[in-house]
Image (cartoon, helix red, strand yellow):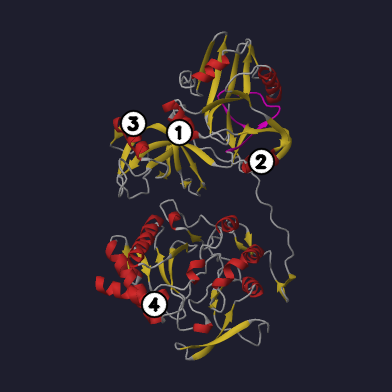
Amino acid sequence: MLANTTEKPFDSDDWIFETKYDGYRTIAVINQDKVELFSRNQLSFTDNFKPIAESLKNLPHNAVLDGEVVVENATGKSDFQLLQNYIKTGKGSLKYYVFDILELDGNDLTNLSVLQRKELLELLLRNQKLPNVSYSEHKIGTGKAFFELATKNKGEGIIAKKSDSAYAVGQRSNNWLKIKITQQEEAIIIGTTEPQKSRSYFGALLLAQYEEKELKFIGKCGSGFTEATLKDLYQKFKPHFISESPLSEKVPLRDSIQWIKPKFVAQVKFTEWTQDKHLRHPVFLGLRADKSAKEVTFTPIIETMKQKPQQKTRENDYDVKVGKTTLHLTNQNKVYFPEDGITKGDIVDYYKEIADLILPYLKNRPQSMNRFPNGINGPSFYQKDLDLDKVPSWLKTASIHSDSNDANIDYLICNDKATLLYMANLGCIDINPWNSTVKNIENPDWMVIDIDPEKEDFAKVVKTALTVKEVLDELGADCCCKTSGATGLHVYVPLGGKYSYDTVKLFAELIAREVHSRIPEITSIERTIKKRNHKIYIDFLQNRTGQTLAAPYSVRPKPGATVSTPLEWEEVNESLSPSLFTIHNVMERFKEKGDLWKPVLGKGVNLKSILKKLESAV
């Protein structure tokens, strides 16, 4: 019997909850002195897991048991990679956790309820001290607490089973549900990409699953390999190389691909499914000998058990006190993101929570307010000049001369949480500060390279960003990267406000030209869109007086309410996606990683010495 998947744990007295183990599902058939172990597709495990078979010979009954064979690490947690090593070396702490019984002394038990079957199973195993064999305990009703405990113990997840359900042999049923902590899937290997740089044998695995009997590409996996693993896998794959793709669809990759007959099944862990049904950040754990490729099917999340976050009930208009300031918030239930049901109030709530992180990058900087009074599908407009007679007197503003308008403009300055929420209440979904502060208006605090794709081709955006870092590393210039929150990436170099806009723009242009010279096939520095030929635009003109980009931690007016999110450079890889970070999930990340953007406000690089290096290189 197989389980479907649901996203969230739940409490119900009609369900029992068990540990989800990370191993091989194993059926044990015990007849007098003969014990046979089988995978769920009837491969023999008897020799592979001989200590389990030997132990079960001591059971004084004929029985058919269902459970999971695992190898546990030093902390007692099941580990699939250790199980893989055990099969090769015979080394490891092998255990068989038994959670069901299908037959006892010739009596078919599959029509009994799961609670009745488990009661019999516990009686059977209680008085038998079998080495390596354990009864899998369960809890009744308290799924949320059991899941929290599994999370605390860094487990794989839990299994929920309807307590009155029979055992449906060979069927996947909603009466059994997987609720995962660590996302794992089985995936069919359909090809490899060419190795890059120092890697040997292959670069990444191409993965697929069956969906309604048709193979569907679900992404590529380039992590989780040692040199020995790469060699071993390559030798296994080589006799099964084929010249044509086993897919009916075209794979959206530019890599050189070696196709493989779809017979090998990989176990991978990953962070989440993307909207287009691809695995995000997959990591290879091992091959599965117990699964045939035909068994590996896409399993949708069961909506009946999926617990959607409840919409907040809030007043539409209300007053809120922020410090010594009282704000009047309006139209909080107005929907700003129609596809996602995200309201103006949700955006205000996000900025309430994120204020301490974002404010250092707004302090004393003129704001170009990008206002969406009717949400992302309505008309928007930029507002720079405030009517000082109509705005609250407590707001901080700065009058800055505009050469293009030949007039002074009264800019809003956002130095505190109250001003931030005031902007959000005006319909500012994203926050767009200047690169310089009013205290040092002619000198930006950072240089920025805006990597801007015309089409959705994020792999090229990532390659461009890594090339920018490569160039800056060679020059000894520190840099930080963040998602734009839309379709691109932003690379910043801290400058400490020591250089003029003209000098910084020259620096950015030299960097852009050098990057373009290294990857001209995918990039352009042409300002005119028609001349770019659909290539990635390396925009260095963002380094002019008055130019703005979305601040780090800013929401963007894009479907899903994505957030411009600071990254660690190791995260800038082929698995990165611009839609990965949203207001629904970033707070947990920010709490874990802290403020990754802090170096941008550091003392800055020595631009003069860097420019000398650049000039000598040219």
Q: Nearer the viewer, mark 4 or mark 1?
A: 4
* Residue bearing mark 2: 149
Labels 4 & 1 near each other (Cβ < 8 A): no
Q: Quadrant of residue 304?
A: top right
- In what quadrant of the picture does the N terminus appear? top right
Q: Disc 1 to disc 3, how far (Cα)?
A: 25 Å
Q: Is residue 21 left or right of residue 535?
A: right
Labels 4 & 3 near each other (Cβ < 8 A): no
Q: Quadrant of residue 11?
A: top right
| Secondary-structure class at tag 2 | helix
Would residue 392 be counted in the magenta stretch? no
Kind of residue at badge 2: Leu
Percent across and percent down for residue 88 are: 41, 27
Q: Earlier in the sequence, mark 4 or mark 1?
A: 1
| Secondary-structure class at tag 3 | helix
The numbered mark at residue 504 is 4
* Residue bearing mark 3: 236
| Magenta extent | 156-174
Q: Earlier in the sequence, mark 4 or mark 3?
A: 3
Q: Nearer the viewer, mark 3 or mark 2?
A: 2
Residue closest to the far top: 32
Kind of residue at badge 1: Lys
Kind of residue at badge 3: Lys
Would residue 167 be counted in the magenta stretch? yes
In this orientation, which residue lies closer to the viewer: 569 or 165? Answer: 569
Percent across and percent down for residue 277 are: 48, 45
Q: Earlier in the sequence, mark 2 or mark 1?
A: 2
Q: Disc 3 to disc 2, how far (Cα)?
A: 40 Å
Answer few, some or many: residues within 10 Å of disc 2's Cα (few below 14, many 20 plus, some between 14 and 19): some
Answer few, some or many: residues within 10 Å of disc 1's Cα (few below 14, many 20 plus, some between 14 and 19): few
In this orientation, which residue lies closer to the viewer: 593 or 24? Answer: 593
